[in-house]
Amino acid sequence: MALLTASVAAPQAAAADRTTAPTWYDATAETIATAGAPTQITNSRIRAIGWLATARATRSLPTSVELGPYQAAALAAAAHRARVTLAPSRAEQLDATYKETLDAIPDGPAEERGVAAGERQADLVLTAREGDGLDPTSVNAAYPVRPARTATHWRADSWTSRMRTSRHGSVEAVAGLGSTVRSGS
């Protein structure tokens, strides 16, 4: 009976290995397309943090569990945690994808340890990137727009600081030249 169970679990684990990364690639693309991030950098940040966490989670390989299910669970857990944290409006859809992914992985210590590793790596990457200046609040901060210049508007930081326009329309040099040029003469 144990042999039969192992032979059924092996194809299931192999299928999970082949489909986990493409599943989360598609989930990431859909999240970015529908989450409504206002800037491209926010979208790039979601991708970068999520895939960095998954790479780190799948890189640590314990010897006491089956490799395929462990890596599939680690990838899914890291991808899920990072994306739900960065795009909370998509939590329901990402939770459904996560459940489907874990359902395809055989239950057991490999899955449990993989999930723990994935969540841990996602948390580490999210913590490291917190306050990096690329978060939506920093990137999307309001830009103070300076008022438009007018003919009588003087600014010390421009070339016009050496000249001024009088109310009669003449331009007077104030750099010590002492001459006046009148328009139309």
Image (cartoon, helix red, strand yellow):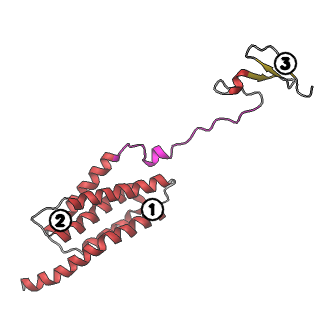
Q: Which residue is mark 1?
A: 32
Which residue, as the protein is rendered here, is positioned at the far front?
177
Sequence-first tag of 3 and 2: 2
Q: Disc 3 vs disc 2: which is toward the camera? A: 3
- Quadrant in the picture for the C terminus: top right
| Residue bounds of the magenta highlight | 129-150
Give the mark nearest the N terminus, 3 or 1: 1
Crowding around mark 2 (Cα neighbors within 10 Å: few <14, some 14 to 19, many 20+) is some
Task: Provide the residue designation for mark 3.
Answer: 180
Image quarter of residue 95: bottom left
Q: Residues within 10 Å of mark 1 (few under 14, many from 20)?
A: many
User: Badge 3: how crowded within 10 Å, few (<14), some, or many (20+)?
Assistant: few
Instruction: Please tell me which of labels 2 and 1 falls first in the chain.
Output: 1
Amino acid under disc 3: Thr
Disc 1 element: helix
Q: Would residue 42 appear left or right of 54 to someone viewing this image? A: right
Task: Give the image location of residue 76, x and y in percent.
Answer: 28, 65
**Tag 1: residue type?**
Ile
Query: Residue 65, position in %: x, y?
Result: 12, 67
